[in-house]
Amino acid sequence: MDKNKNYIELEKLCRELGVDIFGVADIKEIKQDFLIADKILAKVDRAICFGSRLTHGILEELADTPDRLYYHHYKTVNAFLDQAALRLGNYIQDKGYLALPIAASQIVDWDKLKGHLSHKRIGYLAGLGWIGRNNLLVHKTLGSQFRLVTVLTDMPLKTDKPIKDGCGPCRACIEVCPAKAIKPDPEDFNLQLCFAKLKEFQNAHLVDQYVCGLCLKCCKGRG
Ligand code: SF4
Ligand code: SF4
């Protein structure tokens, strides 16, 4: 049971599949919040979280609302991540361990707008970035221009730690948010205002899901 060796093998596979960022979180303290059966949760204590960047040209094409080109890209990146999570899960299973690939984008609690778990929260614990003023995970070189997926497992794996970093003096996303949901203090992010704007975009048939993309277009990290 070599935690480091397993970590290296899984990261190598993910990189070969085309994944851009990779980390592993210890989920013992947070798994009670997941919307997953207790009997499975009792067995898993590691979450492999990995991400794929969004394409600059698609983001540059966005103006002041989301559009069909961005929406298709959003779905394509999620589908790629779901496929990669499936491949990684099968690899882990072939090694004799449990694996649960969790959908990159799927709401299962519509009242609270929650998925089975928060990839953002797990990505933070896995050291992939900090929670920015835009309420998204911000990676030091990719900014918020990526999507995430998670695979839960009982495979012995070394874990990463949250990074001590933050937005610093950057305020780029505050001005571009059409909902005025982003504030100087990340704690003051107004989820209700953001969500109302996402609904507006969907009701106007600009996109078929609650997506926007405007605050991540301007979030380019520090690299
Ligand atoms: S997703 Fe859109 S509405 Fe929500 S905070 Fe970002 S820019 Fe504002
Ligand atoms: S655009 Fe700047 S202020 Fe906004 S989340 Fe990104 S790094 Fe933070």
Image (cartoon, helix red, strand yellow):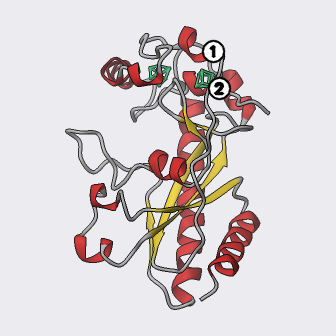
The local crowd at label 2, few if under 14, some if 14 to 19, many if 20 or more residues have their Cα within 10 Å, is: many
Instruction: Give me the disc on residue 19.
Output: none
Q: Is residue 90 left or right of 11 when viewed as pictured? A: left
Q: CA distance from mark 1 to mark 2?
A: 7 Å
Q: Quadrant of ligand 2?
A: top right
Which residue in the rendered view is the most extreme toward the left? 111
Three-letter code for the amino acid on which mark 2 is drawn: Cys
Residue 94, image quadrant: bottom right
Image location of residue 69, percent across then percent down: 60, 31
Tell me whether circle 1 and circle 2 mark residues in contact (CB < 8 Å): yes
Which numbered disc, 1 or 2, marks the residue that appears first in the sequence?
1
Q: In terms of secondary structure, where does tag 1 sit?
A: helix
Residue at (43, 10) in percent of width and height:
180
Which residue in the rendered view is the most extreme toward the right? 223
Badge count: 2
52 is higher (above) or lower (below) than 91:
above
Three-letter code for the amino acid on which mark 1 is drawn: Ala
Residue at (64, 85) in percent of width and height:
2
Q: Which residue is mark 1?
A: 172
Image location of residue 20, percent across then percent down: 71, 53
Residue behind label 2 places its C-beta within 8 angstroms of ligand 2: yes
